[in-house]
Amino acid sequence: MKDVAAVPGIDLDRYLGTWFEICRLPLKWEDAEASDFTATYSKAGDGGIRVENRCLDKHGTPERSIGVVVPQEGSNAKLKVSFLPAFLRWIPFTAGDYWVLAIAPDYSIALVGTPDRKHLWLISRTAALPSDVADNYLALAKSQGFNLDQLITPRQSGRMVADAVFAD
């Protein structure tokens, strides 16, 4: 089987902003019954990239995780992401691969996966996608060897978990 292939390159500034999770392969640290998943990418104060994932757990309780994103090559399509606390991020092998496998020309939809084919996300700037559009992106994932039998499609109301619910 061929290796998983990332797109030739992405413009990280265009990638910044909020994405809604349309579907994903299961993750041991994410509640399969959670809803309203979003990921917001922004410039960090140190010049890096910050990601904040938010959702409502199966009981409707807001949850979030904050991490850092580090490009691995000049194309910016292969990234490493870590959600460990800052004081632990120096530990080797604690950041996960996050490869952009496909992206719409207007940066409205992206397919992201890992080179081991264990993790996959279809994300969009909107909370819903027409099924034929989603199917086209998922067909690309299948063509790269991803097994979609356990694909999770979380409920998306279109609302984002508000800043106010987190007491910082």
Image (spheres, rainbow, N blue to C red):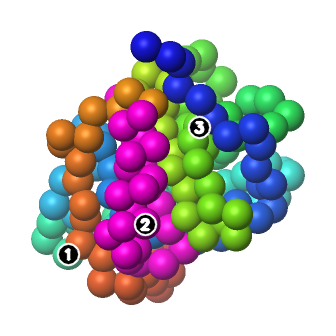
Judging depth in this view, the residue of 46 and 147 nearest the camera is 147
Which secondary structure, mark 1? loop
- Up the image or down, 149 lies above or below 164; here it is above
Which secondary structure, mark 2? helix
- Counting residues from the N terminus, which is met first, the one under dot 2 or under dot 3? 3
Q: Does the magenta stretch include residue 103?
A: no
Residue type, label 3? Trp
Residue type, label 1? Gly
- Up the image or down, 3 lies above or below 11; here it is above
- Counting residues from the N terminus, which is met first, the one under dot 1 or under dot 3? 1
Residue 31 spot, x, y in % from top left: 22, 53
Q: Mark 3 points at which residue?
A: 99
Residue type, label 2? Val
Which secondary structure, mark 3? strand
Horizontal side of 149 relative to 117 (left or right) equals left
Q: Mark 2 points at which residue?
A: 133
- Is residue 50 in view? yes
- Counting residues from the N terminus, which is met first, the one under dot 1 or under dot 2? 1
Q: Which mark is residue 60?
A: 1
Q: Which residue is drawn at 45% across and 43% down?
A: 140
Question: How many residues crowd mark 2 within 10 Å: few (<14), some (14–19), many (20+)?
Answer: few
Bounds of the magenta segment: 118-143
The quarter of the image holding the N terminus is top left
Residue 117 spot, x, y in % from top left: 40, 28
User: How far, Cα to Cα, is label 1 from label 3?
Assistant: 30 Å
Residue 130 spot, x, y in % from top left: 37, 75
Horizontal side of 18 relative to 122 (left or right) equals right
User: How far, Cα to Cα, is label 2 from label 3?
Assistant: 20 Å
Q: Is residue 132 magenta?
A: yes
Question: How many residues crowd mark 3 within 10 Å: few (<14), some (14–19), many (20+)?
Answer: many
